[in-house]
Every structure is written in structure tokens, then in C-alpha cells.
Image: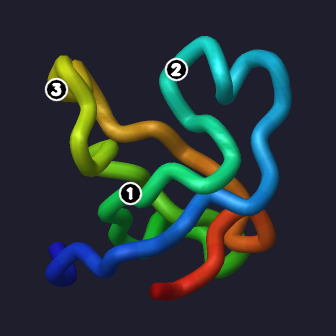
Amino acid sequence: MAAPKTYTVVEADFYDQQEGLKIGVQVEAVPAATADQLLITQIIGADFPLDEPIAVFTKQLAAV
């Protein structure tokens, strides 16, 4: 697995927000199996760790 990179969330729907992905939050993510998705492995500064990675589209994140 590739080393995680840091991104800022720029787009998040209701379900993403339920997972803690709010616009402006920084996350660490790695490439997913498809080129248009990333797997979020950590929400930086979150009070709780992720039970499993969250798949998002690349357009939802901006590299820091």
C-alpha cells in the first residue's frame, strides 16, 4: 500500500458528513483500486479512529 498523503475535504454530502468528513477537514488518504477514488485512512484531529477506510471520489479532496 502506498504511503498516505494529506488532503483537504472540498466536497462532502450528508452521508460523508455523518462519517466526520466535513468541508475544510484535513485527512490522510491512499489510492483506491480505481483511479477516480481515494481511501481515507485517517481524519486528522478526529476524536476517534476510523474502523475502516472511507472511499471517496478524487474530486472531493484537494492535495495540501
Residue, disc 3? 49
Task: Say above or below: 39 vs 15.
Answer: below
At label 1, the amino acid type is Val
Q: Residues within 10 Å of mark 2 (few under 14, many from 20)?
A: few
Taking the spot 49% from the left edge, 66% from the top edge, the residue there is 33
Give the numbered dot on residue 59: none
Residue 57 left/right relative to 40: right
At label 3, the amino acid type is Pro
Task: Say above or below: 23 vs 59.
Answer: above
* Closer to us: 37 or 46: 46
Residue 1 left/right relative to 54: left
In the image, residue 6 lies at what x, y percent? 35, 75
At label 2, the amino acid type is Glu
Between disc 2 and disc 3, whose residue precedes? 2
Between disc 3 and disc 1, whose residue precedes? 1
What secondary structure is found at the residue carrying circle 1?
A: strand
Task: Say above or below: 56 vs 22.
Answer: below
Residue 61 left/right relative to 54: right
Please say if the residues under marks 2 and 3 sit with CB atoms less than 8 Å apart: no
Query: Separation of disc 2 and disc 3 at Cα?
Result: 11 Å
In the image, residue 23 lies at what x, y percent? 69, 47
Q: Residue furthest top?
A: 18
* Closer to us: 54 or 28: 28
Between disc 2 and disc 1, whose residue precedes? 2
Give the numbered dot on residue 27: 1
Classify the position of the N terminus by image quarter: bottom left
